[in-house]
């Protein structure tokens, strides 16, 4: 039996208190930079929440555009023309293809040629450019962004915002904000097989093991569960938080350093007893023939094909994957002959918890932007487009009366000839490819408000998400531990050596090619590769930041 619920609750409560104390005062200097009349060309006087931003005279702003091959930029998109009409702003685009986008952006920043606005940036990507002064410390100008500031306060995101701070206490990446953590990943199951065998939908890892065992007994030739992305989604996005530590979207050992609330310090993730417990669980599934060992070596298409063809009955799923699975299974198994659904995020040793962050991808701004006479207008434009309710609805759904309608209850639906995400199948145009909306360059977190984040979900997915938000506790943010450039370079070397070795042994433990009885030896081997030095450096940075806050 996997259980540690009482301890997990205490950890979460203690974590919230400790983080609240450590965050106090850390943002005290936010919004204290002075701006002059020379920076206010086109800016609105008294711009506030609820105001439509419209520059007082035509202005041009420069932007780095990530050009996606599935929806290449078009100058006549409705998004482009309507945005210019509403805001009196035209955008001078520098284009960078999706393939190689980050490299292109780095070259532009390093060469001093970066556009003023650089969307589609993820936490940590700003760090290499902070010391050179190439990026704007956006936290100095939060007072120019009433919508952003209001949402941070309304959603209670101050502690999460602190995780974005650099060693100097400032924030250089303007993040997307969400009203709540958006749960998505879990295990998808063939519910028609559950019904056939008289089984209930599992709600925990223990119950999932029992369900898989029952499927195996009824279908001996089938390995009931397989997975995609070499098992990384299963371990990091689905399992890690429920075993007591946050995961990461790369590697098998997740975040290299995770906060241990009881110890009051960072520890190396792959050396934690909770990590060993996760390895024991998944090794047991493989050893009992319940989890496909090829999960960790097969390519994505092979994994999906096993599930949609009936060779497996369980696989990691999110809202988009579920649509893809159903489309394929209608062809392979026949519409109406099967049913699938996402199980609740499994309850694990840490209790009814889930990982995730209410801040997501955001944007960097060039430091040179502050020298422009349109600087204040630029900040107001960004605030309206990316953080106001009106701007968010515009970039998500488009133009009311043209791409969508809204009924008396505020429920949106596409107009007759517009489709997206198969919500209006048979329509002749697509919201993204034909009009430019729902485009990651212009929307940082696909909605921000609960209303918008749920507005394009099928009924079953909306119900699942609401259930998770109501029943699962979100793991609190870890305390910030920012470092300077030299320390980051040293840490990166340790992380690389440790991460490669941890990932290699993670697979060996799960697949049984290394005995879990040797886990303590594995931890000692990690120490020989610099684990203690690495963790000491992280904790040193955490303490220094806490003392300076």
Image (spheres, rainbow, N blue to C red):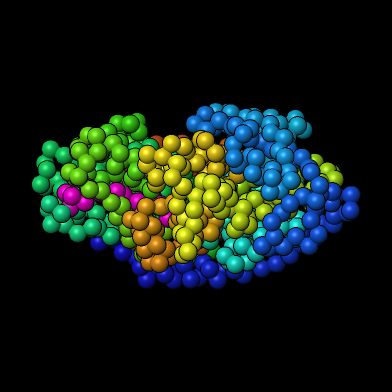
User: In the rendered view, does 5 fall on the left or right side of 84?
Assistant: left
**Magenta-drawn segment:** 180-194
Residue 239 on image: x %, y %: 37, 52
Judging depth in this view, the residue of 244 and 178 nearest the camera is 178
Residue depicted at 77% across the width and 33% down the height: 112
| Rendered position, 167 above or below 514 | below
Position of residue 509 in the picture relative to residue 180 (left or right): left
463 is higher (above) or lower (below) than 87:
below
Q: Is residue 255 shown to the viewer in this render?
A: no
Q: Position of residue 380 (x, y in %)?
A: 73, 53
- 330 vs 125, left or right, is left
Screen quadrant of the C terminus = bottom right
Q: Is residue 11 visible?
A: yes
Q: Position of residue 136 (x, y in %)?
A: 75, 46
Q: Is residue 155 above or below residue 182?
A: below
Instruction: Name the image quarter holding the N terminus.
Output: bottom left
Quadrant hosting residue 518: top left
Check residue 33 for magenta coloring: no
Front-lying residue, 299 or 500:
299
Count of marks overlaid on the render: 0
Residue 184 falls inside the magenta stretch: yes
Residue 28: give x, y in percent of width and height. 73, 65
The answer to whether residue 520 is above or below residue 472 is above
> Residue at 60% across / 58% down in the picture?
389
What residue appears at the point 72 percent right and 62 percent down from the top-left corner? 48
Q: Nearer the viewer, residue 191 or 234?
A: 191
Q: Is residue 173 left or right of residue 18?
A: right
Identify the residue shown where x is 24% and y is 34%: 331
């Amino acid at each position: 039996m996997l259980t540690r619920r009482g301890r997990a609750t205490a950890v979460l409560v203690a974590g919230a208190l400790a983080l609240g104390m450590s965050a106090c005062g850390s943002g005290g200097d936010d919004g204290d930079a002075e701006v002059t009349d020379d920076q206010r060309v086109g800016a609105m006087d008294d711009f506030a929440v609820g105001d439509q931003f419209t520059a007082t005279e035509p202005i041009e702003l420069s932007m780095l555009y990530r050009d996606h091959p599935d929806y290449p930029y078009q100058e006549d998109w409705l998004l482009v023309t309507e945005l210019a009409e509403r805001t009196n702003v035209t955008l001078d685009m520098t284009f960078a293809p999706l393939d190689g986008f980050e490299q292109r952006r780095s070259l532009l920043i390093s060469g001093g040629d970066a556009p003023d606005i650089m969307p589609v940036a993820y936490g940590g990507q700003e760090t290499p450019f902070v010391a050179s002064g190439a990026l704007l410390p956006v936290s100095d100008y939060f007072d120019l962004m009433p919508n952003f500031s209001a949402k941070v306060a309304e959603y209670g995101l101050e502690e999460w915002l602190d995780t974005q701070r650099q060693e100097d206490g400032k924030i250089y990446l303007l993040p997307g904000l969400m009203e709540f953590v958006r749960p998505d990943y879990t295990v998808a199951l063939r519910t028609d097989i559950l019904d056939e065998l008289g089984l209930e939908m599992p709600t925990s890892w223990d119950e999932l093991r029992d369900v898989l065992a029952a499927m195996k007994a009824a279908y001996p030739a089938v390995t009931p569960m397989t997975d995609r992305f070499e098992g990384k989604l299963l371990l990091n996005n689905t399992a890690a938080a429920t075993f007591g530590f946050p995961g990461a979207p790369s590697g098998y050992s997740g975040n290299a350093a995770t906060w241990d609330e009881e110890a009051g310090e960072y520890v190396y993730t792959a050396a934690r007893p909770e990590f060993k417990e996760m390895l024991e669980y998944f090794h047991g599934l493989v050893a009992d023939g319940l989890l496909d060992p090829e999960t960790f070596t097969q390519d994505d298409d092979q994994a999906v094909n096993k599930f949609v063809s009936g060779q497996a009955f369980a696989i990691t799923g999110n809202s988009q994957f579920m649509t893809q699975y159903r489309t394929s299974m209608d062809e392979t198994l026949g519409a109406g002959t099967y049913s699938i659904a996402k199980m609740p995020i499994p309850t694990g040793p840490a209790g009814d918890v889930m990982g995730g962050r209410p801040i997501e991808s955001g944007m960097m701004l060039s430091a040179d932007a502050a020298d422009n006479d349109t600087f204040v207008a630029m900040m107001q434009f960004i605030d309206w487009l990316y953080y106001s309710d009106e701007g968010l609805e515009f970039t998500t759904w488009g133009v009311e009366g043209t791409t969508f309608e809204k009924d008396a209850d505020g429920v949106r639906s596409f107009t007759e000839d517009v489709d997206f995400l198969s919500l209006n199948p048979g329509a002749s145009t697509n919201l993204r490819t034909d009009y430019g909306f729902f485009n990651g360059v212009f929307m940082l977190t696909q909605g921000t408000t609960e209303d918008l984040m749920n507005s394009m979900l099928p009924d079953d997915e909306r119900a699942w998400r609401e259930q998770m938000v109501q029943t699962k506790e979100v793991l609190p943010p870890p305390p910030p531990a920012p470092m300077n450039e030299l320390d980051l370079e040293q840490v990166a070397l340790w992380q690389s050596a440790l991460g490669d070795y941890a990932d290699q042994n993670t697979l060996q433990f799960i697949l049984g090619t290394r005995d879990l009885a040797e886990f303590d030896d594995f931890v000692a081997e990690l120490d020989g590769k610099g684990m203690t030095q690495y963790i000491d450096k992280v904790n040193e940075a955490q303490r220094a930041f806490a003392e300076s806050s």
